């Protein structure tokens, strides 16, 4: 059956004008179909260009099982539902039973909309509100991504509700609620498309006995499965931020009946001031740091006690207020949960958790994250779902999937399949390793990097993505490079990521300096992206609290954290970054890694063994020659 779809003269070849037969795509489809039929676990590393989406989507549809497909990001989720599924419907000539689920913040909350229309927040009239009002008369989904107002508009925070803010079944709009409707459709659908964040949020909610987000299912397919460990830690931990408490106070002020009792008004002001005072302690930190390095449990508990006391007093006063029961219950529950989360974090008494404080763009937070994602998944997922597919272009670190199996708690005998990319990297790509680069941790590395980047970009005539492992290095190199080149250079942080990517794609000779999110998930085929430059090997930050905690666990197990955790994780990240370059058979380009440790350290060969099999050079003249032939 699958050969008649994926074969050289199969259905896809007949229906898709640009279809290219790939033996690896058929092999993956057969492996996925077999695992779904036999209720098995399966790992598939499918190289770029394999066509993995159809290779798992079609077998999932043909299986007749109720399956959840979880993607790494909302953008990939959106592409699968809005592009791949409709295309497959045209090919198969039938409507597919597929539902698209996202988190609450992606849907307009009808109750909050009504309350705000009644003047609860005293929002001034705006063009955005008028557009939303007109859109609400037509929309069936309430998905803000479909609204005539950008999802990035800050005002959406007033019209959407977090899990904490939702009134649940007590909401007067429960039956009309967009989320209630989409979940009802999900109960009936055979295929549910989600992202990893929503999937793990659902597992966490079920584990805590608070209902469900995703209805029962028979199998799961994780696309971009290399991201799972990090997402598990995020959703099975707890955190309290100054913004979370501010949001609570804002909702009390907005949705309680006026006028306020003077005592409540005073209590809210005191809670606000205590919230500011407590979190002000952390405003000088950069990024995420260990909470244990800032305070001992005793000192932290003492500092947070004043905030706990203010919240307790606020709870007592709200309980006495006359208001709708659904609002009162919601506000009381939120205060109780915040107090519980503060207590859990401040105790710092769980050896299997990493405790941290983090400064973000709009907030400061403290929290804790579980170290062992493997133990969590063994408890809450594997006993309940027997058929699970893990796929990505980057899962194997040259260790027969050992790193992935250990981090996700998979049995050692779980089948793992590596399917090579159909691209001819020998002809399509060149790997440039600059000679005589200083050590990345030395004082001369920034200037040397800038010098090499200028040479490479001059040869490539821009058309490049320059990836950095940290923001500070990116900014310093940008300052040195920008005045020396005639090309437009975009810097991450100057615009939103989608806007940056759009501008980069439009200007063929432009250059994009980026970190973090741009290492994976972006697709820029063609001439616009003809070069990817990476400043240094993407090892995890050693003083990150979660990394430190995992390191200690591995040491206690008698293992080497460097070889068992840091090296394989960096290999997978590097493969992701370099994977931005060759996206189609027609693409040609240069990969450049400025880090000399690839050839000066013993572990360098591990990285090189896992990179695309292309020509390697240390001579910039080869780079110049390559681009002259492009």
Image (tube, rainbow, N blue to C red):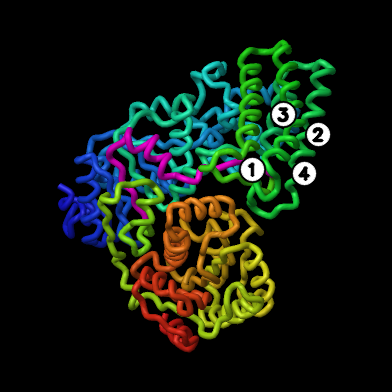
Q: State which tag comes first along the sequence, 3 or 1.
A: 1
Q: Is residue 291 left or right of residue 163?
A: right
- Marks 2/3: CA–CA distance: 13 Å
Which percent across, then down, holds residue 607?
A: 41, 70
User: Which one is nearer the viewer's eye here, 233 or 89?
Assistant: 233
- Marks 3/4: CA–CA distance: 16 Å
* Residue lying at 56% horizontally and 18% vertically, measured from the top left: 171
Question: Magenta segment, which residues?
Answer: 364-392
* Residue lying at 74% horizontally and 31% vertically, measured from the top left: 305
Q: Callout 3: helix, strand or loop?
A: helix
Which percent across, then down, holds residue 75?
A: 47, 48
* Residue indicated by mark 1: 153
* Residue indicated by mark 2: 273
* Residue indicated by mark 4: 280
- Marks 2/1: CA–CA distance: 28 Å
Q: State which tag comes first along the sequence, 1 or 4.
A: 1
The answer to whether residue 399 of the structure is visible from this angle is yes
Q: State which tag comes first along the sequence, 2 or 4.
A: 2
Observer-side mark, 3 or 1, equals: 3
In the picture, which quadrant includes the C terminus? Answer: bottom left
* Residue lying at 73% horizontally and 40% vertically, measured from the top left: 299
Observer-side mark, 3 or 4, equals: 3
Which percent across, then down, holds residue 322?
A: 72, 10
Q: Is residue 473 above or below residue 403?
A: below
Q: Callout 2: helix, strand or loop?
A: helix
Name the mark on residue 308. Answer: 3
Observer-side mark, 2 or 1, equals: 2
């Amino acid at each position: 059956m699958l050969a008649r779809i994926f074969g050289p003269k199969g259905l896809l070849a007949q229906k898709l004008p640009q279809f290219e037969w790939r033996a690896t795509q058929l092999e993956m489809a057969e492996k996925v179909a077999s695992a779904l039929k036999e209720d098995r676990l399966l790992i598939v590393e499918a190289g770029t260009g394999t066509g993995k989406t159809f290779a798992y989507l079609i077998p999932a549809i043909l299986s007749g099982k109720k399956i959840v497909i979880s993607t790494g990001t909302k953008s990939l989720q959106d592409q699968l539902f809005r592009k791949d599924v409709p295309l497959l419907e045209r090919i198969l000539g039938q409507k597919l039973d597929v539902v698209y689920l996202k988190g609450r913040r992606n849907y307009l909350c009808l109750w909050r909309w009504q309350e705000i229309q009644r003047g609860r927040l005293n929002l001034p009239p705006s063009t955005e509100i008028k557009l939303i009002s007109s859109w609400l008369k037509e929309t069936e989904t309430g998905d803000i991504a479909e609204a005539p107002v950008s999802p990035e508009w800050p005002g959406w925070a007033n019209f959407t509700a977090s899990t904490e803010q939702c009134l649940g079944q007590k909401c007067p709009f429960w039956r009309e609620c967009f989320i209630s409707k989409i979940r009802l459709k999900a109960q009936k659908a055979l295929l549910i498309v989600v992202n990893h964040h929503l999937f793990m949020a659902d597992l966490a909610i079920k584990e805590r006995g608070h209902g469900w987000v995703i209805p029962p299912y028979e199998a799961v397919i994780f696309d971009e499965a290399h991201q799972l460990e990090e997402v598990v830690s995020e959703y099975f931990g707890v955190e309290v931020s100054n913004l979370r408490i501010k949001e609570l106070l804002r909702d009390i002020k907005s949705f309680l009946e006026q006028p306020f009792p003077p005592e409540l008004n005073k209590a809210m002001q005191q809670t606000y001031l205590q919230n500011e005072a407590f979190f002000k302690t952390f405003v000088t930190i950069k990024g995420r740091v260990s909470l244990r390095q800032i305070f001992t449990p005793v000192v932290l508990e003492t500092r947070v006690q004043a905030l706990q006391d203010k919240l307790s007093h606020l709870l007592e006063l709200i309980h006495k207020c006359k208001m709708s029961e659904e609002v009162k219950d919601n506000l009381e529950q939120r205060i109780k949960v915040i107090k519980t989360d503060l207590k859990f974090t401040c105790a710092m008494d769980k050896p299997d958790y990493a405790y941290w404080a983090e400064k973000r763009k709009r907030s400061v937070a403290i929290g804790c994250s579980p170290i062992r994602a493997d133990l969590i998944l063994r408890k809450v997922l594997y006993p309940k779902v027997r058929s699970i597919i893990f796929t990505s272009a980057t899962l194997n670190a040259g260790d027969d999937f050992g790193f992935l199996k250990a981090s996700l708690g998979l049995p050692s005998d779980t089948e793992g399949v590596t399917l090579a990319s159909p691209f001819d990297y020998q002809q399509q790509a060149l790997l440039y390793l600059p000679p005589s680069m200083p050590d990345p941790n030395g004082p001369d590395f920034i200037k040397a990097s800038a010098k090499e980047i200028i040479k490479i970009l001059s040869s490539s005539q821009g058309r490049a993505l320059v990836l950095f492992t940290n923001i500070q290095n990116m900014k310093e190199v940008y300052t040195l490079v920008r005045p020396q080149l005639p090309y437009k250079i975009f810097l991450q942080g100057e615009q939103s990521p989608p806007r940056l990517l759009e501008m980069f794609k439009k200007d063929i000779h432009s250059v994009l300096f980026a970190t973090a999110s741009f290492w994976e998930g972006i697709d820029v085929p063609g001439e616009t992206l003809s070069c990817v430059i990476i400043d240094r090997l993407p090892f995890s930050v050693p003083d990150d609290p979660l990394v430190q905690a995992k390191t200690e666990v591995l040491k206690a197990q008698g293992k080497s954290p460097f070889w068992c955790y840091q090296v394989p994780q960096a290999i997978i990240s590097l493969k992701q970054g370099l994977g931005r370059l060759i996206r189609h058979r027609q693409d040609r380009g240069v990969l450049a890694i400025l880090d000399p440790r690839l050839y000066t350290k013993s572990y360098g060969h591990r990285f090189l063994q896992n990179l695309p099999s292309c020509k390697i050079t240390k001579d910039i003249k080869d780079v110049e020659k390559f681009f002259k032939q492009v």
